[in-house]
Image (spheres, grey):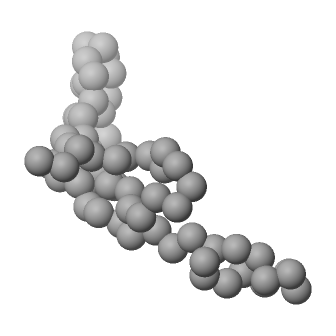
Protein backbone atom coordinates (compact mmCIF):
# COMPACT_ATOMS: atom_id res chain seq x y z
CA UNK A 1 0.00 0.00 0.00
CA UNK A 2 1.33 3.43 -0.96
CA UNK A 3 1.43 6.09 1.74
CA UNK A 4 -0.60 9.23 1.08
CA UNK A 5 1.28 12.44 0.40
CA UNK A 6 -1.05 15.31 1.30
CA UNK A 7 1.63 18.03 1.16
CA UNK A 8 4.60 18.86 -1.06
CA UNK A 9 7.56 17.47 0.87
CA UNK A 10 10.42 17.92 -1.59
CA UNK A 11 11.32 19.70 -4.81
CA UNK A 12 10.36 17.63 -7.85
CA UNK A 13 7.74 15.51 -6.08
CA UNK A 14 5.59 13.95 -8.85
CA UNK A 15 2.17 14.12 -7.15
CA UNK A 16 0.12 15.16 -4.13
CA UNK A 17 -3.02 13.46 -2.77
CA UNK A 18 -5.94 15.90 -2.44
CA UNK A 19 -8.68 14.95 0.06
CA UNK A 20 -12.29 14.69 -1.15
CA UNK A 21 -15.01 15.52 1.37
CA UNK A 22 -18.74 14.75 1.39
CA UNK A 23 -20.58 17.76 2.74
CA UNK A 24 -23.96 17.36 4.46
CA UNK A 25 -26.92 19.13 2.89
CA UNK A 26 -27.28 22.82 3.65
CA UNK A 27 -29.41 23.34 6.74
CA UNK A 28 -32.30 25.81 6.79
CA UNK A 29 -32.31 29.01 8.84
CA UNK A 30 -34.66 27.40 11.39
CA UNK A 31 -32.43 24.34 11.80
CA UNK A 32 -29.40 26.59 12.21
CA UNK A 33 -31.15 28.74 14.82
CA UNK A 34 -32.26 25.72 16.88
CA UNK A 35 -28.78 24.20 16.69
CA UNK A 36 -27.17 27.43 17.92
CA UNK A 37 -29.77 27.82 20.70
CA UNK A 38 -28.81 24.41 22.09
CA UNK A 39 -25.07 25.07 21.46
CA UNK A 40 -24.62 22.04 19.21
CA UNK A 41 -21.99 21.64 16.54
CA UNK A 42 -22.99 21.99 12.92
CA UNK A 43 -22.73 19.28 10.26
CA UNK A 44 -19.17 18.03 9.77
CA UNK A 45 -17.75 17.24 6.31
CA UNK A 46 -16.72 13.58 6.00
CA UNK A 47 -13.48 12.50 4.30
CA UNK A 48 -14.41 9.87 1.71
CA UNK A 49 -11.36 9.52 -0.55
CA UNK A 50 -8.18 11.08 -1.92
CA UNK A 51 -7.55 12.17 -5.49
CA UNK A 52 -4.04 11.98 -6.90
CA UNK A 53 -3.04 15.28 -8.51
CA UNK A 54 0.04 15.26 -10.75
CA UNK A 55 2.35 18.24 -10.25
CA UNK A 56 4.00 20.12 -13.11
CA UNK A 57 7.23 21.68 -11.90
CA UNK A 58 8.26 24.85 -13.72
CA UNK A 59 11.44 26.92 -14.04
CA UNK A 60 12.16 30.42 -15.30
CA UNK A 61 13.27 30.78 -18.92
CA UNK A 62 15.22 33.97 -18.14
CA UNK A 63 12.73 36.21 -20.01
CA UNK A 64 10.07 36.43 -17.30
CA UNK A 65 8.14 33.36 -18.40
CA UNK A 66 7.91 29.83 -17.04
CA UNK A 67 8.71 26.60 -18.86
CA UNK A 68 8.36 22.98 -17.72
CA UNK A 69 11.46 21.40 -16.18
Q: Quadrant of the C terminus?
A: bottom right
Foreground of the two, 15 or 12: 12
**What residue sits 51% from the left and 73% below the top?**
56
> Does residue 63 lie above or below 17 as drawn?
below
Instruction: State the image coordinates of residue 30 (x, y, percent, origin top left).
Output: 26, 36
* Farthest residue, direction top: 38
The answer to whether residue 28 is left or right of residue 48 is right
The answer to whether residue 56 is left or right of residue 18 is right
Foreground of the two, 13 or 52: 13
Instruction: State the image coordinates of residue 32 (x, y, percent, origin top left).
Output: 29, 33
**What residue sits 34% from the left and 47% below the top?**
5
Instruction: State the image coordinates of residue 62 (x, y, percent, origin top left).
Output: 86, 81
The answer to whether residue 20 is left or right of residue 13 is left
**What residue sits 26% from the left and 61% below the top?**
51
> Does residue 23 lie above or below 14 as drawn?
above
Quarter of the view holding residue 41:
top left
Q: Is residue 7 visible?
A: yes
* Farthest residue, direction left: 1
* Farthest residue, direction right: 63
Foreground of the two, 64 or 48: 64
Amino acid sequence: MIALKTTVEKDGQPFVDKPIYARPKQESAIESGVREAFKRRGPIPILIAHERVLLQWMKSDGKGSLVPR
